[in-house]
Image (tube, rainbow, N blue to C red):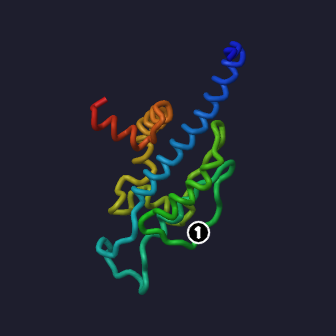
Amino acid sequence: MASMSFSMQIAEFIAKTKANQDLVVRAITMEISKEIDSKSPVGNANYWKSKPPPGYVGGRFRANWQLSLGSPATGVLDKVDKDGSATIAAHAAANKAAKAGDVIYLVNNLAYAKRIEEGWSGQAPIGVVARTVVKFSVIVDNAVNGVRNGTSTTDFAQGYKTYGL
């Protein structure tokens, strides 16, 4: 069996590197999505000064995080997602097409989203996005190292914490 030529080895390395860049972008995007989702307050009448309207169910803010590629999503979703699983699943589906160099948007178009980010919610007194931005470098490091080591960002982060790396 003949060995690969040097130029073929370089071409293979470049192809693998490009694929890894795409994986890193997708991993970062999903970790940011999960962070924002988990930090998003879900309406809880126990925190309210007045009674909620009849039939109220929390989770509209969480359900309205929309992930899109190329241009920001517009409009508001008529959905409720108390635990965030449906929102994360929708983000994962949209994120499958993401590549290095793409512009990826994660927006919430609800009228009160800005107020929540400004700390108007007792459940998110310093916002949602701001808390995620603080963790951005850790999210990126975990994504890069997870892809490099062939594991998920969550597994890599857990190992990092466990072994004090």
Image quadrant in which you'd find residue 99 = top right
Residue 163 placement, left or right of 52: left
The quarter of the rendered structure image containing the C terminus is: top left
Image quadrant in which you'd find residue 6 = top right
Question: In the rendering, at what x and y percent does residue 36 appear?
Answer: 45, 53
Residue at the image point whose x is 40% and y is 56% from the top: 38
Q: Which residue is mark 1?
A: 77
Q: Secondary structure at mark 1?
A: loop
Establish if 129 lies above or below 7.
Answer: below
Residue closest to the far top: 6
Question: In the rendering, at what x and y percent does residue 19 appear?
Answer: 62, 34
Question: In the rendering, at what x and y percent does residue 122 appear?
Answer: 33, 62
Establish if 77 lies above or below 6.
Answer: below
Residue at the image point whose x is 70% and y is 22% from the top: 11
Residue 19 placement, left or right of 118: right
| Pick the front one: 6 or 40 | 6
